[in-house]
Image (spheres, rainbow, N blue to C red):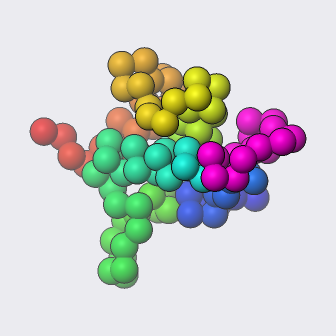
Amino acid sequence: MIEKVSDITSLEIANYIRLDDYDDNELDTYLKIAKNYISNYTGIPETSEVEGVETLDTYSDFIIVVYILCQDMYDNRAMYVDSSNINKVVQTILDMHTRNNL
């Protein structure tokens, strides 16, 4: 069972998308982009070396966001997240945790 974002690997993404044959590099790229997107959207860093600082691992609901974003990038074969057509579940979860409201 995956309990934090940093535990997600390309194998978990492949299982979520239901892929038998896949390219690790491609899924690793989607995984990196998804984490970066969440971090940029919310203002929460992916990792921190400072004890007690919140990171993506602090919130377990980001796990499904990573899965959905990776699936969307795989389905559309795009190396970016289309911000104008974002999944409502993803947007709702990210909006709950946004720290960089400008």
User: What segment is highlighted magenta in the picture?
Assistant: 13-27
Q: Residue at x 64, y 26 (%)?
A: 75
From the image, give the main secondary structure of the stretch colored magenta: helix
Q: Residue at x 50, y 52 (%)?
A: 32
Residue 17 vertical position relative to residue 43 in the rendered view, above or below: above
As rendered, which of 78 and 91 lies closer to the eye? 78
Does the rendering let one see residue 56?
yes
As rendered, which of 53 and 24 lies closer to the eye? 24
Locate residue 66 relative to residue 56 in the image: left or right: right
Residue 74 vertical position relative to residue 61 in the rendered view, above or below: above
Q: Quadrant of the N terminus?
A: bottom right
Residue 93 vertical position relative to residue 7 in the rendered view, above or below: above
Locate residue 17 relative to residue 64 in the image: left or right: right
Dividing the picture into quadrants, the one containing residue 48 is: bottom left
Q: Position of residue 14 (x, y in %)?
A: 75, 44
Q: Residue furthest left?
A: 102
Does the rendering let one see residue 62?
no
Q: Position of residue 43 (x, y in %)?
A: 28, 51
* 20 in magenta: yes
Q: Position of residue 45 (x, y in %)?
A: 34, 60
* 94 in magenta: no
Number of marks in the image? 0
Q: Position of residue 44 (x, y in %)?
A: 33, 56
Q: Quadrant of the C terminus?
A: top left
Dividing the picture into quadrants, the one containing residue 70 is: top right
Q: Residue at x 56, y 63 (%)?
A: 6
Q: Residue at x 64, y 47 (%)?
A: 27
Q: Residue furthest right?
A: 20
